[in-house]
Amino acid sequence: MIAVLLLGAFVSIGSIEKGDEIVQAQLELLKISYFCDDPLYRTKRSDAVKIISRLQGVTSFGQTIVEDLDTALKNKKVKMNKPVNRGDCIVLIAEAKDAVDRLINQK
């Protein structure tokens, strides 16, 4: 939640490259969360929509990117670059979340 609040300040000084990095990291988090059957996937999806809406004007991605990814995941049209070992899911999700937070908090 703090990350979403920090975006307000970021949007005013951000660049499109930086905004795209944040969105790409957020989408990677969603993919990992989905493939790991994370019970908080829907919450992460909702957070991604909020973040992208706050980044309007400083990202080349539109708000439909999350819906498109969600549909592709459900239709099994998206695969991970590397197979996901279920035993590593907690670590993978935490690392992906940290990557998103780190990008948001960078100045």
Image (cartoon, rainbow, N blue to C red):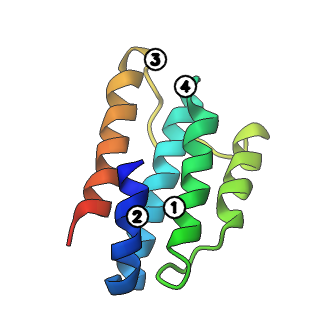
Seen in the image, is 20 located left or right of residue 14? Answer: right
Element type where label 2 sits in the image: helix
Which image quarter holds the C terminus?
A: bottom left
Question: Are the residues flagged by discs 2 and 4 in contact, CB closer than 8 Å?
Answer: no
- Binning the other alpha carbons within 10 Å of mark 1 as few (below 14), some (14 to 19) or many (20 upward) gives many
Mark 1 to mark 4: distance in Å? 20 Å
| Residue marked by disc 4 | 38
- Disc 4 or disc 3, which is closer to the eye? 4
2 or 1: tag closer to the N-terminus:
2
| Residue marked by disc 3 | 86
Q: Which image quarter: residue 35? A: top right
Seen in the image, is 21 located left or right of residue 30? Answer: left
- Identify the residue shown where x is 34% and y is 63%: 6
Give whichever of 4, 100 is nearer the camera: 4
- Disc 1 marks which amino acid? Ile
| Residue marked by disc 1 | 51
Seen in the image, is 14 located left or right of residue 81? Answer: left
Question: Are the residues flagged by discs 2 and 1 in contact, CB closer than 8 Å?
Answer: yes
The x, y position of residue 84, in whole percent, is 46, 27
Please, is residue 6 above or below residue 19 in the view?
above
2 or 4: tag closer to the N-terminus:
2
The x, y position of residue 81, in whole percent, is 47, 44
- Identify the residue shown where x is 57% and y is 59%: 50
| Residue marked by disc 2 | 22
